[in-house]
Amino acid sequence: MRLMITGIPAAAISRWELSDWHGELADWLRHGLPKILAILVVAFVLARLLGLFTLKLEEISKREELPSRIRAQQLRTLAGVIQSVGAVVIYFFALLQILQTFQINVTPLIASAGILGLAIGFGAQTLVHDVINGFFILIENIYDIGDVIKIAGVQGIVEQMSLRATVLRDDTGAVHTVPNSAFQIISNMTRDWAQVALYVSVDYSEGSDRVINLLKEVGSDLQNDPEYGQYIVGEPQVPGIERVSGSDVDYMIVVKVRPGKQHDVRRELRRRIKECFEKNKIKAGAPNRMYVMETPPPVSN
């Protein structure tokens, strides 16, 4: 009825609306669509380059000639973190740019994402702490798989490590899974080199210079041994007398060895010292010797 009063036919209004819609569509096809395609192409290229970079890191991690300071586990984990985080960042910003081409205000979306991230952060503080600690452990090369470490009161060999937790196996064979946020101090017993400090108890009557010279000979023979010499990274040292107690004198011998070989070298060193003392008639100390003294009978009145 209103259309008849104004004198404008409904068909004409429909043509005008259709004409406006076609105009907006044509304008969007000329300007908006190429922009969206350009955004998608750039995002795809960046994601592809990121994938090639992380793939290269994984290939490098499999090389056998890597320097000792560069760890395969570190590179693989770093590649995974870069791939996942980088892909999320690239596509998130691409989505924001595409929404802007549709005249959509992205400010509330960014604010909502920030609030959501903050809520998730408060709800998963321990997990976030684990991941952050694990990331810096890998980046700073604090320990590696196969190292003997002590963390959170647990000592053992590192069997697995990730951004969330570290798996240790102790001397009894028990497996300990320690979250990366559970420790503040990390003790690595096999970084670069390990040290064997052996205390040798000798009878007080034995000459000190003779005992020291014999221990030096044992250390020198061990260093020149074809099998065990390759494990020793420094000349064995005999500082001298470490302790004098009653009828025993403790001497100390120190040997620097390759990581993980300290137990083998310690056992062989003890065996050689025993044979040397037996050959040279050196009396060993008796730390567990018991002295029995007869008390006088009580005096009777």
Image (tube, rainbow, N blue to C red):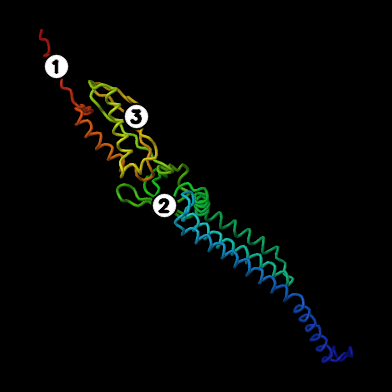
Residue 247 versus residue 32: which sits nearer the camera? 247
Report, in whole angstroms, how far the alpha carbon at label 1 lies from the one at label 3: 42 Å
Q: Is residue 124 left or right of residue 285?
A: right
Label 3, secondary structure: give it. strand
Residue 270 versus residue 131: which sits nearer the camera? 270
Instruction: Kindly report which numbered mark, 2 or 3, lies closer to the viewer in this rendering.
Output: 3
Q: Please tell me how many numbered marks the rendered image carries.
A: 3
Q: In terms of sequence position, does the residue under pointer 1 or pointer 2 come before the other? A: 2
Confirm or deny contact between disc 1 and disc 3 (CB under 8 A): no
Name the amino acid type tagged 1: Thr
Decide: is 133 above or below 234.
below
Instruction: Identify the residue at horizontal 41%, vertical 55% (top origin).
Output: 160
Q: Which quarter of the figure has residue 288?
A: top left
Structural crowding at the residue carrying mark 3, measured as other residues with C-alpha within 10 Å and reported as few (<14), some (14–19) or many (≥20): some
Return the x and y of residue 219 as percentages of the image width and height.
31, 34
Name the amino acid type tagged 2: Ile
Decide: is 146 above or below 90.
above
Instruction: Kindly report which numbered mark, 1 or 3, lies closer to the viewer in this rendering.
Output: 3
Q: Which residue is mark 2?
A: 145
Q: Which quarter of the figure has residue 106?
A: bottom right
Q: Which residue is mark 3?
A: 238
- Image quadrant holding the C terminus, namely top left
Label 2, secondary structure: give it. loop
Q: In terms of sequence position, does the residue under pointer 1 or pointer 3 come before the other? A: 3
